[in-house]
Image (cartoon, coloured by chain):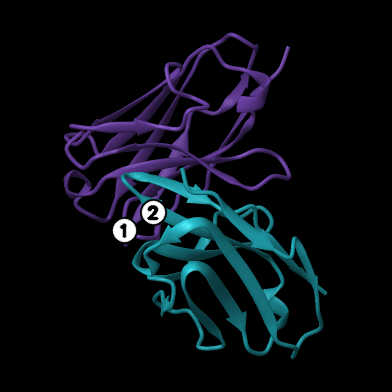
Amino acid sequence: QVHLVESGGGVVQPGGSLRLSCAASGFSFDSYGMHWVRQAPGKGLEWVAFIRYDGSNKYYADSVKGRFTLSKDNSKNTLSLQMNSLRAEDTAVYYCAQDLVPGLKYWGQGTLVTVSS
Amino acid sequence: EIVLTQSPGTLSLSPGERATLSCRASQSVSSSYLAWYQQKPGQAPRLLMDGASRRATGIPDRFSGSGSGTDFTLTISRLEPEDFAVYYCQHYGRSLLTFGGGTKVEI
């Protein structure tokens, strides 16, 4: 059974950094790309980033490009999102999800990031 | 960049009624790369449909999807109490995803 568990959320000041993790189990992690999708309070879903199954290519939304970095450790079944230069508009629940074109069938429960002074 | 526009923003219906949700793309997209999700408060989104019309595992057959080109529709034939939620369409293109703004189906 596929299981995704995010961690690392919390409260951070504007300009600060935070590192999110997503622990995966129940599937061959090294065979699947992974996405991060976020949802600001009371708002819709926003795609954040995608990494290919082997980590060879990474793609970012324009809103986070240059500030967020995605990595994938296939030996530890872990996905990470390093978030730097955080802004108030980055406040959201961050979900990791398994890539399964064209839809995302498996999602984590999400971790809340709050950027506030 | 493809933009997905969902309408209406809110749909007020009663249990047993039919719900018709629209998703319009800013340019023609392949239906193979169009998906629908349901999201309830405090929960992660749940995949309903992919390939525009293919129900995901475990999704009841009162949910159906259709459309092509720029216009796609999610239909719930008879609303059950558990169907009141927010619904999102999503397009998968060139390793990035685009979501619509969502339609809230409320009682």
Q: Disc 2 designates what residue?
A: B92
Mark 1, other Cα within 10 Å: few <14 / some 14–19 / many ≥20: some
Residue B48 in view in this figure: no
Name the one closer to the observer, A25 or A95: A95
Corner quadrant of residue B89: bottom right
Q: Residue at x 44, y 79 (%)?
A: B58
Camera-nearest residue between A47 and B31: B31
Q: How many marks?
A: 2
From this view, report whether residue A79 is shown above or below residue A33: above
Q: Is residue A74 above or below residue A87?
A: below
Tag 1 secondary structure: loop
Taking the view exactly as shown, the residue that stands out farthest to the top is A15
Q: Nearer the viewer, mark 1 or mark 2?
A: 2
Q: Tell me whether circle 1 and circle 2 mark residues in contact (CB < 8 Å).
A: yes
x then y, percent, for residue B106: 79, 70
- Say which of B64 and A5 sits in front: B64
Q: Which residue is mark 1?
A: A101
Q: Which chain is cyan?
A: B
The residue shown at (66%, 52%) is B42
Instruction: Give left or right: position of A43 versus A59.
Output: right
Q: CA distance from mark 1 to mark 2?
A: 7 Å
Residue A45 drawn at (x, y percent): 58, 47
